[in-house]
Amino acid sequence: MRSVIRIVLWIALIVVTGLAFVVRVRYGGGQPYPDVTGAPILSGNELETVLSYPEPIGNVAMSADGRGFFTVHPESRPEGAKLLEFRDGAALPYPSEALQDDLFQTPLGVAVDRQHRLWIIDHGKHGFDTPRLVAIDLLTHEVVHDHVFDNTAAPGGSFLQDLQISPDGRTVFIADASFWRQRPAIVVHDVSTATDRRVLENHPSVSAQDWIISTPAKKMTFFGGLAAMKPGIDGIAVTPDGAWLAYGAMSHDTLYRVPTTALLDKSLGDLALASRIEALGRKPLSDGLSADLEGGIWITDVEHGAVLRMSPGGELETWIETPRIRWADALSFGPDGWLYLADSAIPDQVMRSKSHIASQAPYYIFRFRPGIEGVPGH
C-alpha cells in the first residue's frame, strides 16, 4: 500500500512540475524595462482629483459637452453597477443598473464618438462567454447598437479591452490584448453591417516583448514568479483627422501607427497590411493612448505613474509624474483642453482578494490641463 501511495505522490509531483514548467515557459520570464521618462513639465500639483470611488476604475470617456463615464474594472469582480456617469464628484449607474444586468458581463473600454454615442466593449469573460459591443445614444439614452462577437473575432482567451471610433462613426477599432490566448490582434468592426475583421493577429507590433512590469507597489508577476503580466496591444488612438490608428502593446518598447484606409481595405491580407505599419518612436510600458489636434499621441506609463506625449516626430516628453497615480490607465480629452486619466490601480486589484481591494480604496479619476487641445472622447 505504501508503495502505491509513493507512486501516486511521485506522479502528482511530476504532473505539478510539468504544469509549472509549461506556465513558466508560456507566461513567465522577462527583464526590467529602462525608465524612459524625463523631468515632468507639470508638477503633481496640477493633477486634480475628479472622482474618488470605492471600487477600482476601469476606463474613462468624456463627451464634447463635458459628460463623463467610467467602468468599474472587471478584474476587481464588481457586484453592482459596472458602467457609471460621474458629475460633480458623484457617480450614478448609466444606463440603469437593471438594464446593465441584461447588457454587460465584463465591460471595460469606453469611448464617445462625434455622433454623441457612448460605446462600450465587453470582453465577455475573456472570450469564454459573450463578448459584446454596445452603443448608447447620449441624447435619447437608447441602445442603438448591440453586437455579439462570434469566436472568429473574439475567440476563447481573447481580451477585447480598448476601442476607438472613426470620426464618421462608421468603424470601431478594437484592441485584443489577448493575455491568456497570446494571439493579440486588432478587430475592425463595421457599424452599418455589424461585421468584424480580425487583422494583424500575432504580428510583432501588436505582441508583447519580454519585459516585466514593475511598479512601486508590486512587480507584476504571479504564482511565485511563474507568470508575468505581459499583455499585447492595449492602448489605441485614432488621429483627429481619422487618417491613422496609433497603437502599442503594453509590454513593448515601440509605438506604431497604421493608416485607417489600410485597415478598412478588405483586399489587403496581413502581409500587405503589415507593410503599411510605421514605427513612431520608443515608448514606456503603457496602457491608454489619446491623440491631440497637434498630431501628438499621449501615452500612459504604468510603471512610473506618468503621462507622456510623443510628438509627430517621435520625441517623448514627460508631462506629469507622481506617486499619486498607482496605474495610469485610460486617457480621454474633455472640453476646454482637460485630459482625464483613469487610475485603475492594477497592482491592488488583479488577482487580489475583495478584502484587499476594499482596503486600498478609494480609487480615482484625475485630470490635468496640458494646454494642447484634443478631441473630447478620444
Image (cartoon, rainbow, N blue to C red):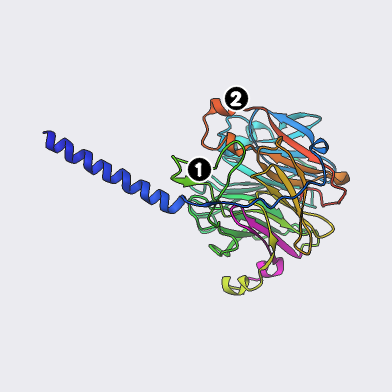
Residue lying at 57% horizontally and 40% vertically, measured from the top left = 105
Q: What stretch is highlighted in magenta?
A: 243-266
Q: Which of 173 and 276 is in front in this view?
A: 276
Numbered marks: total: 2
Q: Where is mark 1, residue-wise?
A: 221
- The residue at the point 61 percent across, 29 percent down is 80
Marks 1 and 2, how far apart in space? 21 Å
Question: Which residue is labeled 2 in the image?
Answer: 359
Q: What residue type is labelled 2?
A: Ser
Q: Where is residue 136 in the image (x, y as percent from the top left)?
A: 71, 44
Q: Helix, strand or loop at disc 2?
A: helix
- Where residue 274 sits in the image (x, y, percent)? 61, 70
- Report the amino acid beneath label 1: Thr
Q: In the figure, is residue 286 to the left or right of 47?
A: left
Q: Quadrant of the N terminus?
A: top left
Residue 161 seen: yes
